[in-house]
Image (tube, rainbow, N blue to C red):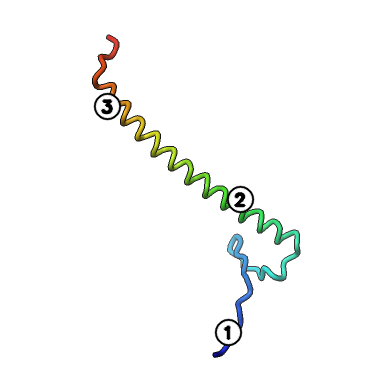
């Protein structure tokens, strides 16, 4: 069994590639912060989608129930 050399982690940012292992610690911390922010954005975007679907279902139910009620003149 031959061990293959592991590729160093690469940061691609604004079209440029950087060896993540060689970046200063403060830059690595910024990268980690951006990864957390990206994950939070995806989570909240998913939450908004779920809320939108739920709201649409409620609007549909409301529409059906209001069909049986006479609107104001």
Label 2, label 1: how many angstroms apart (C-alpha)? 33 Å
Percent across and percent down for residue 26 are 75, 59
Local crowd at mark 2 within 10 Å, few (<14), some, or many (≥20)?
few
Local crowd at mark 3 within 10 Å, few (<14), some, or many (≥20)?
few
Instruction: Give me the residue at 36% from left, 31% from top.
Output: 58
Q: Nearer the viewer, mark 3 or mark 2?
A: 3
Mark 1 residue element: loop
Nearest to the observer: residue 33 or residue 23: 33
Drawn side of residue 23 relative to residue 10, left or right: right
Mark 2 residue element: helix
Label 1, label 3: how many angstroms apart (C-alpha)? 63 Å
Label placed on residue 4: 1
Q: Which residue is mark 2?
A: 37
Q: Which residue is mark 3?
A: 64
Nearest to the observer: residue 4 or residue 31: 4
Residue most toward the top?
Answer: 73
Label 3, label 2: how many angstroms apart (C-alpha)? 41 Å
Instruction: Give me the residue at 44% from left, 42% from top.
Output: 49
Instruction: Give me the residue at 28% from left, 24% from top.
Output: 65
Nearest to the observer: residue 22 or residue 68: 68
Q: Are marks 3 and 2 in contact (CB under 8 Å)?
A: no
């Amino acid at each position: 069994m031959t061990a293959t050399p592991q590729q160093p982690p690469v940061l691609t940012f604004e079209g440029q590639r950087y060896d993540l292992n060689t970046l200063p610690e403060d830059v690595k911390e910024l990268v980690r912060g951006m990864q957390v922010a990206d994950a939070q954005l995806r989570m909240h975007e998913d939450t908004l989608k779920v809320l939108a679907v739920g709201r649409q279902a409620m609007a549909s139910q409301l529409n059906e129930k209001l069909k049986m009620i006479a609107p104001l003149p």
